[in-house]
Amino acid sequence: MKPMLGAVVTSLLLMARAEACTTTWNITLETFGEGVTVELRSGVPGNSATVATRRSSGGQVQFGSLCAGDYFLAIGNDDSVNVTPVRKFQNGSSYSSSITVTRSTGNVAQRSRQSL
């Protein structure tokens, strides 16, 4: 009977976690071309993990089923990428961002992908 109880508790925890991860992030991206790699990372630069990678299509990128936490984007096709500021997301929310990547300074920093 105890192994069955453990399986039920595990299933309930997994279901609760799945329900909590309903945050979306919609991004309008203006860059130098189509098909730019947009990497969603959790944590902070220097101590992060890749959550998902997308290629921009028509300037639109969407990440869904995100859990609450700290996220940022690494944007670019080379080892040198543009890095956005870290954003803190809440459960069950929808976020939108408009990002323009230019060759000048602005709200994104340039870093080595390996340093993330």
Image (cartoon, rainbow, N blue to C red):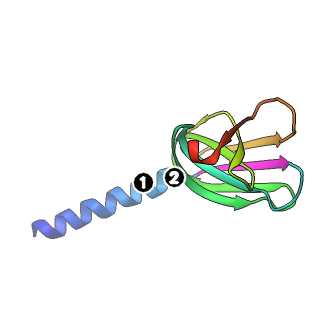
Residue drawn at (55%, 53%) of the image: 50
Badge 2 is on which residue?
21
Kind of element beneath mark 1 = helix
Percent x, y for residue 9? 25, 59
Residue drawn at (71%, 46%) of the image: 80
Q: Which residues are magenta?
A: 23-30
The three-letter code of the residue at mark 2 reads Cys
Q: Magenta part mainly helix, strand or loop? A: strand
Q: Quadrant of residue 56?
A: bottom right
As drawn, 58 above or below 68: below
Residue 29 among those drawn in magenta: yes
Residue 58 among those drawn in magenta: no
Residue density around tag 1, few if under 14, some if 14–19, many if 20 or more, within 10 Å: few
Residue drawn at (40%, 60%) of the image: 15
The three-letter code of the residue at mark 1 reads Arg
As drawn, 93 above or below 77: above
Residue drawn at (10%, 70%) of the image: 1
Q: Are marks 2 and 1 in contact (CB under 8 Å)?
A: yes
Report the disc number at residue 17.
1
Report the disc number at residue 89.
none
